[in-house]
Amino acid sequence: MDWTSAQLRSLVELTRRGTVTAVAEALGYTPGGVSQQIAALEKATGMQLLRRVGRRVELTDAGTTLALHAERILTTEAEAVEALERTRNEISGTLRVGLFATAAAEILPPALRQVREKHPDVTVRSRDMDVDEVYDAVAGGTVDLALGLDYPDVPIPRDPSLRVRELSRERFSLAVPVGALPGRRSISLADAGDQGWIMPSTGSYYGRAVLTACRRAGFEPQVLHEVTDTAATLALVEAGVGVSVVTDLMLRLRPSRLDVLDLHETMERHIVVVFRSFAAQRPTVAAFVDILSASAGAGSAH
């Protein structure tokens, strides 16, 4: 069959994400571009792979069957690329990296400087994405590796095809409006139970982790503002409309006038790098992971 990897990947992502628009956002295409990839794949196979159901599209039986095999083809293709690179034993080529906003601002820039100094033949192309999507992006081959977050209270599923290496740990504190709790340098979560809370959706790993910690402390947080963006969260605390848990890395994203109190409880998040298991032996991937680990203080693989 005369098809391309880009066409197969578009089909596989459609089975994962459900809409052409979501696929376009994940792969960096326009919706029209995704539709063209699928149309070209239908021409190559001589079969209808999608059908319209109202305003949505869904895969036909042929599309579902091809998507299953396409995933295997893409995995085999990626393994072949890794194997070829190992035979060269050179640290060169292009790395596609997925990352979330905090990582883009604080973690990636120093790592890129080291890559330029130590491995000038490596080109890194990064893509900002929702932190809860980075694991699927690596598993699906959209990126070669990704920086993500893991919460002990709500750990990410451990896919045997992926490796998760811890880079660093951050302990949460509580950000409160200036003067809201005068004389306090530390606090328990329970003592903040009567405060209005600013926190992300409980549909996210982060939101579920915060909710779990609050419930363990014996209260249900009164969520006044459901916000995902860190800078917006800090701005709301600064405006005096609620409290939120924060880490040092989060605080560096936006200089804000607020009080930060140590939490009596240990509430953490782990910054991790995720890559496919068979890519661990790829020299370029291994070199970049080593740079991330060294700059973050080194972690352990799980």
Image (cartoon, grey):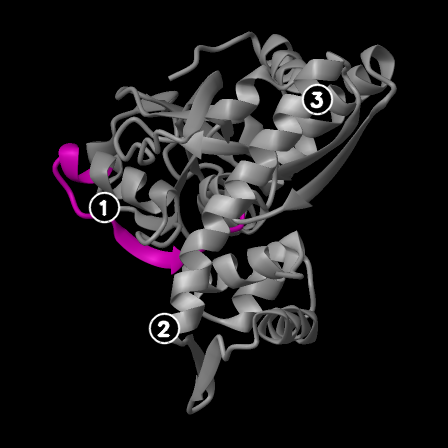
Q: Residue at x 70, y 70 (%)?
A: 33
Residue placed under numbered mark 1 in the picture = 194
Q: Residue at x 35, y 43 (%)?
A: 205
CB contact under 8 Å: marks 1 and 3:
no
Q: CA distance from mark 1 to mark 3?
A: 57 Å
Q: Earlier in the sequence, mark 1 or mark 2?
A: 2
Q: Earlier in the sequence, mark 3 or mark 2?
A: 2
Residue placed under numbered mark 3 in the picture = 85
Q: Secondary structure at mark 2?
A: helix
Q: Earlier in the sequence, mark 1 or mark 3?
A: 3
Horizontal side of 93 relative to 132 (left or right) equals: right
Q: Is residue 236 above or below residue 269?
A: below
Q: Is residue 73 above or below residue 54?
A: above
Identify the image quadrant of residue 105: top right
Q: Is residue 127 above or below residue 191?
A: below
Q: Who is closer to the viewer here, 102 or 293?
A: 293
Q: Secondary structure at mark 1?
A: loop
Q: Who is closer to the viewer here, 231 or 13?
A: 13
How far across and how far down the image is residue 120, in percent? 87, 19
Q: CA distance from mark 3 to mark 2?
A: 37 Å
> Which portion, as a residue range, is magenta?
214-229
Residue placed under numbered mark 2 in the picture = 61
Q: Nearer the viewer, mark 1 or mark 3?
A: 3
Residue 3 appears in the figure: yes
* Residue type highlighted by circle 1: Asp
Residue 256 appears in the figure: no
Identify the image quadrant of residue 264: top left
How far across and how far down the image is residue 144, in percent? 61, 34
Identify the image quadrant of residue 183: top left
Sort mark 3 into few (<14), some (14-19) or many (20+) by Cα contacts within 10 Å: some
Q: Residue at x 52, y 46 (%)?
A: 73
Q: CA distance from mark 1 to mark 2?
A: 54 Å
